[in-house]
Amino acid sequence: MHFLGADPQAFPPAENANEDGILAVGGDLSPMRLIAAYQRGIFPWYSEGLPILWHCPDPRFVLVPERLHVPKSLKKRQKAAPYRLTLDTAFEQVIDGCAGTKRPGQRGTWITRDMRRAYVELHDLGIAHSCEAWRGDELVGGLYGVSLGRVFYGESMFARADDASKLAFVTLVEWLRTWGVALIDCQQETEHLARFGAEPWPRAEFLEAVGTLSKLPTKRGKWHFPGDEPA
């Protein structure tokens, strides 16, 4: 197991991850280190009380925006527009909603206090983004992730109302496609994301794509859906 030192750029080759996808231990969650990790296809994932664990699983679950599949029933819900959808309006509330959601087979949350602080800092730098679903003034769902180059690295989502996170996800993916994002990293395989067209890629294929796409210009700053720009 590789232990990270003080240099935020010094990661071992992502291909060296073990069979559980763990590549390295330690280091910190500074913006410079997180950006260096994502650009190499690596992400942090650990529980409170443990050292920081850096992962690069094989295979990697990804969604190509052009291959997004929206079930007919959800298309009808999307057309009906039951929720107001926004971008980067309530990032901290979204990350707290994700942290507070109970998930099958998972005790507690991997969104530790340090992780929350780190991603809020990335958001302040215009690199981490959220998509929110509102019912009136109530936040009922959303998701957040990191955008670098032409890759969006999805982190987590939550819902407190029917289809809230699904509609936020589908709408965000459709706009990411128009903005030139070519790949969405879903990290781990889930049946939920598979229904939208996500698929497993061999790690080597994923790393090759990220190596190219991460070098392209990043859409930084606060995001808005067209028409929602502040006056």
Image: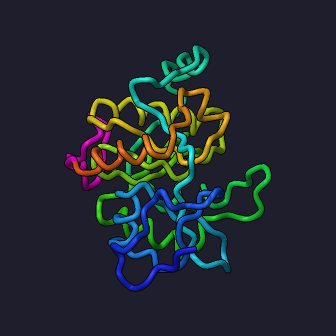
Q: Is 196 drawn above or below residue 101 in the view shown?
A: above
Q: Total marks drawn? A: 0
Q: Is residue 130 left or right of 36 when viewed as pictured?
A: right
| Principal secondary structure, stretch drawn in magenta | loop
Q: Position of residue 154 (x, y in %)?
A: 48, 48
Point 47% across, 25% down: residue: 68
Q: Position of residue 32 (x, y in %)?
A: 33, 72
Which residue occupies the foreground of this view, 149 or 2? 2
Image quarter of the N terminus:
bottom right
Point 63% across, 44% down: residue: 159
Which residue occupies the foreground of this view, 92 or 105? 105
Q: Is residue 217 left or right of 89 when viewed as pictured?
A: left
Q: Name the image quarter holding residue 160.
A: top right
Q: Position of residue 113 (x, y in %)?
A: 57, 75
Q: Is 27 drawn above or below residue 124 in the view shown?
A: below
Q: Verify whether residue 104 appears in magenta.
A: no
Q: Is 35 drawn above or below residue 226 in the view shown?
A: below
Q: Is 149 drawn above or below residue 110 in the view shown?
A: above
Q: Verify whether residue 230 appears in magenta.
A: yes
Q: Which residues are magenta?
A: 216-231
Point 31% across, 49% down: residue: 211
Q: Is residue 169 left or right of 6 when viewed as pictured?
A: right
Colour mode of the rendering: rainbow
Q: Position of residue 181 (x, y in %)?
A: 32, 38
